Every structure is written in C-alpha cells, then in structure tokens.
Image (tube, helix red, strand yellow):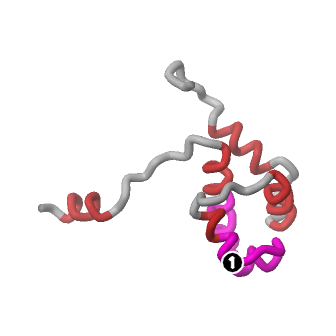
Amino acid sequence: MTTQELVKDALPAYQAPTTYSEVIRDEVKAECGRRGISQRQLARVMGLTQPTISDRWRGRIAWTLDEVERLERVLGLDRGALLFRCARRDSNPQPSDP
C-alpha cells in the first residue's frame, strides 16, 4: 500500500459544508485560526465555556443568530459578514441543488 493510500484511509474524507450552520462553523474556526484565537480565549470574550465553544466548532450545536452577531463584534467583522459568507458560498447554485 502506498503512503498516499495509507493517509487516505487514515483521514476522513473532507466534505464541503452544505448548510448555513456548517458554513458559519467553518468560517468562525477559520477566522479564529487566522487571528490566533483559541477556544478558551473565544469562550472568555463570548461569555461561554470552552466546552460550549468546542461543541460549536465540532458542529454538535449550531451557533445562534445572537451568538453570530456577538462573534462578528468580537472578531471585528462587519455586521452580517458571517451571514454574507453563507450566501457567497451558495452564489453558484446548480440545477441538482435542492
């Protein structure tokens, strides 16, 4: 078995986000990564616990709209920026889309 096959078998296949909740989850994680913000730091400024942030980052629990608005303020993003990113990701709908 080649190294590429071993890696492919060891890692789960990447699945692009398909829901707004998944897009927001990915965008928040990416934005925090770009800024070097840990789950613990984000939890502190959001008034949440680190396990709560972990649940959001893993997609176990979706971010609420109020939390998204607070996230935008905390991260210094324009109001509605995360929601706009959801729309932008779906700006090229396909005939097979539901």
Give the dominant element type of the magenta stretch: helix, strand or loop. helix
Q: Nearer the viewer, residue 28 or 67?
A: 67
For the point 61% across and 56% down, the residue is 26
Task: Give 12 or 77, whichever is nearer the viewer.
Answer: 12
In the foreground, 36 or 24: 24
Label 1: how many residues lie within 10 Å, few (<14), some (14-19) or many (20+)?
A: some
Assign the C terminus to one quadrant of the image: top right
Q: Is residue 3 above or below residue 39?
A: above
**Mark 1 belongs to which amino acid?**
Gln
The image quadrant that residue 4 belongs to is bottom left
Residue 71 image offset from top left, x and y in percent: 80, 62
Q: Quadrant of residue 93?
A: top right
Q: Position of residue 27 (x, y in %)?
A: 66, 55
- For the N terminus, the image quarter is bottom left
Counting every numbered tag in the picture gives: 1
Relative to 82, say whether 73 is above or below. below
Q: Which residues are magenta?
A: 27-53
Quick one: SS at disc 1?
A: helix
Residue closest to the far top: 95
Where residue 88 sits in the image (x, y, percent)? 68, 38
Image coordinates for residue 92, horizontal then vertical, percent? 60, 28
Compared to 95, does 60 lie above or below?
A: below
Let me know if residue 7 is in the magenta part. Answer: no
Residue position marked by numbered label 1 in the rendering: 50
Residue drawn where x is 68% and y is 68% of the image: 32
